[in-house]
Image (cartoon, rainbow, N blue to C red):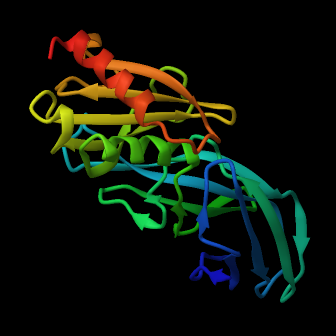
Amino acid sequence: MVFSKLKALLGAGLTVDTLLHETSVTPGGTLKGEVRISGGEADAAVERIAVAFTALIEDDAKSEDATRVDDYFTAEVSGKFDLAKGAAHSAPFEIQVPWETPFNAVEGRPLVGGMKLGVSTDLALDQAMDKGDLDWLTVEALPVHKAVWSALENLGFAFQETDLEAGTIQGATVPFYQEAEFWATGGDYAGRVKELEVTFVTGEASTDVVFQADNASELLAPDLNTTIRFSLPTADAADATEAVREQLDRLLTQKGA
């Protein structure tokens, strides 16, 4: 179990701490924890407690280095209750991690890039909202992510970095998309494609995989000759090398490479 640092100080000494049972989760998995409130020097009326999944996102519209914070999913873990002076209250929770949550680790290996994921605790008290600091999360890749990752490495691609870009692509509901950048450093694709950007639109049953090769345009308005999209079962951990090879060949035929 991991305690967060002090999350909020409201009114006359009212404090809120969030305890996460684990800080490593998977998309579609369960985040378990507990929000603990200690009463202050006067009675208080709490309106609600919520836990928000948060991502730090690059905003290219502003500048290359600009980032913004997006709460892309919020779950209420407690409704209204009265907290007496000096009393304590606990709100345990189990929340499903949104399927479209980006991942920042593959087989326990942290991914290089400017992507940070976490949760924060929101407390509404006397018609005012107090938002706590972020508790960072490690989000492990799902079987489909790992299968595509391994297939690309088998075909001579080397992972470079990953980040989050602002905007919603087709089929997604979150206000960003994750790009993982690979370079063709060997195998049949060296010299035919330099940079391959991979994006996943993850669902419970199936996941769409988007490949974009050597394209300077954004994924929100792509050059269709350099982009291809296909689906794989989300829970399938089988070797995807041949399926990925087929899609790469189709992409390069479109591209004329």
Question: In the image, is residue 26 above or below residue 199?
Answer: below
Image spot of residue 13 (x, y percent): 68, 85
Image spot of residue 43 (x, y percent): 85, 78
Query: Residue 51 vs residue 208: left or right?
Result: right
Residue at the spot 76% in from the left edge and 85% down from the top edge:
40
Residue situated in front as seen by the camera: 21 or 4: 21
The quarter holding residue 44 reads bottom right
Could you tell me if residue 221 is visible in this image?
no
Residue at the spot 35% in from the left edge and 28% down from the top edge:
245
Question: In the image, is residue 224 above or below residue 148?
Answer: above
- How many numbered marks does the figure carry? 0
Query: Residue 233 vs residue 228: left or right?
Result: right
Residue situated in front as seen by the camera: 95 or 72: 95
Question: In the image, is residue 145 above or below residue 129?
Answer: above
Could you tell me if residue 255 is visible in this image?
yes
The quarter holding residue 121 reads bottom right
Image spot of residue 127 (x, y percent): 72, 56
Residue at the spot 47% in from the left edge and 35% down from the top edge:
200
Residue situated in front as seen by the camera: 76 or 9: 76
Question: In the image, is residue 127 above or below residue 224?
Answer: below
The quarter holding residue 39 reads bottom right
Query: Residue 4 vs residue 41: left or right?
Result: left
Quadrant assignment for the N terminus? bottom right
Residue at the spot 13% in from the left edge and 27% down from the top edge:
192
Image spot of residue 114 (x, y percent): 31, 56
Quadrant assignment for the C terminus? top left
Residue situated in front as seen by the camera: 204 or 61: 204
